[in-house]
Image (cartoon, helix red, strand yellow):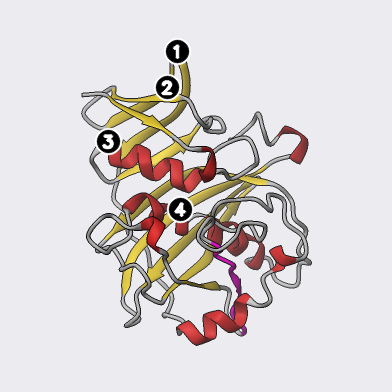
Amino acid sequence: MSANVRIDARFNGPPDCANGGYAAGLFAIAAGDTVAVRLHRPVPLECDLTVLPVSDEGWEVRREAELIASARRTRVELEVPAAVSYIEARGVSTHYVGFHKHAYASCFVCGPQRQPGDGLRIFAGSVPGTNTVAAPWLPDESLNDGAGKVRPEFIWAALDCPGYFARVNGLPNAPYTPRAALLGEFAVHIDRPVHIDEPCVIVGWPMRVDGRKHHVGTALFDEEGECCAVGAATWVTVDKTSAGTVAS
C-alpha cells in the first residue's frame, strides 16, 4: 500500500531541499521496515511525495512521475566504537569546525544558524586520540512522539550529519575544507528511542572511501551510555554549484 509524505520547510539540509536523514527516516517509516534509503536527487520541500512498494523487498519515492528516492530491505550491523561521556562530548563539540566554515549553515541538524528549539544543533567535534567525532544532544519537546520519547524520524536525522564530519576526520592530518557533500544512501536501526530532555551522545566514524563516496557509521547513546540506534551512510562529495541538482 502506498503512503504520502510531505516535508515541512523547517526540515531543510541545503537551503532548498530536505535534510537527507530526516527525509530518509520518513520514507522508512512509510515503508514500515528496516530499509536502506537511496536518495536519487535532493528531496523537495513542501510538496506531496508518494512512497509505494515496487517489490517484496523494495519501495520507490516519487513526486508524480519523478523518482526521488528508493529503498530496499536491509539489516544494519556495525562494530560500534566505545561510548563517549556526555561531558566529553560537550567539550569536543566546542571545537566543531562548522562554527567557522559550513557548507549548509542553516541545516536542521547541524546548522549553527538554527536556534534552540528550531534546529537539532548537533555539533560533532573530533575526539582526541581516536578517529571518531562526538556530539552531545538534548532532544527538545518539539521532537516528542506524544509519549515522552523522540520520534524515529528525528533519530534518523540526528544520526545523519555527524557522519559528514566523520568522513573529514577519517583523513589523517588533512585540513578541514567545507567541501559540499550530500547523503547518498542511509540505513538506520533503532533498538529503542531516547527520551525528551535525556542527555544523549552521538558518535560518528569513517569506514572506507571509494572515490567520491565516503562510507561512515554513526551511533546514538542514551544517558546510561547504552547504544540505542546505529546508522550506516554513504556520503557523496559534490561541487557546491551543483549541490542543488545532484545528490549521488
Q: Which mark is residue 157?
A: 4
Q: Is residue 186 above or below residue 78?
A: above
What is the magenta segment's predominant secondary structure? Answer: loop
Q: Reading the chain from its start, which is encountered first: label 3 or label 1?
A: 3
Tell me if I can see residue 195 in this picture. Answer: yes
SS label for mark 1:
loop
Give the tally of numbered discs: 4
Q: Position of residue 199 (x, y in %)?
A: 41, 77
Give, as a single range, the part of the protein colored magenta.
121-128
SS label for mark 4:
helix
Instruction: Decide whether residue 8 is among the magenta residues.
Output: no
Q: Position of residue 50 (x, y in %)?
A: 36, 24
Q: Is residue 230 above or below residue 34?
A: below
Q: Which mark is residue 62?
A: 2
Q: Reading the chain from its start, which is encountered first: label 4 or label 3?
A: 3
Name the residue located 34 percent from the left edge and 75 percent from the top edge: 222
Indicate the quadrant containing the C terminus: top left, top right, bottom left or bottom right. Answer: top right
Q: Is residue 69 above or below residue 165?
A: above
SS label for mark 2:
strand
- Give the amino acid type for the residue marked by disc 1 in the picture: Ala
Name the residue located 37 percent from the left edge and 49 percent from the top edge: 153
- Give the amino acid type for the residue marked by disc 4 in the picture: Ala
Q: Which mark is residue 65?
A: 1
Q: What is the CA distance from the residue labelled 1 to the residue labelled 4?
A: 26 Å
- State if disc 4 and disc 1 touch (CB < 8 Å): no
Q: What is the CA distance from the residue labelled 2 to the residue labelled 3?
A: 13 Å
Q: Reading the chain from its start, which is encountered first: label 1 or label 4?
A: 1
Name the residue located 52 percent from the left edge and 48 percent from the top edge: 234
Q: What is the CA distance from the residue labelled 3 to the residue labelled 1?
A: 19 Å
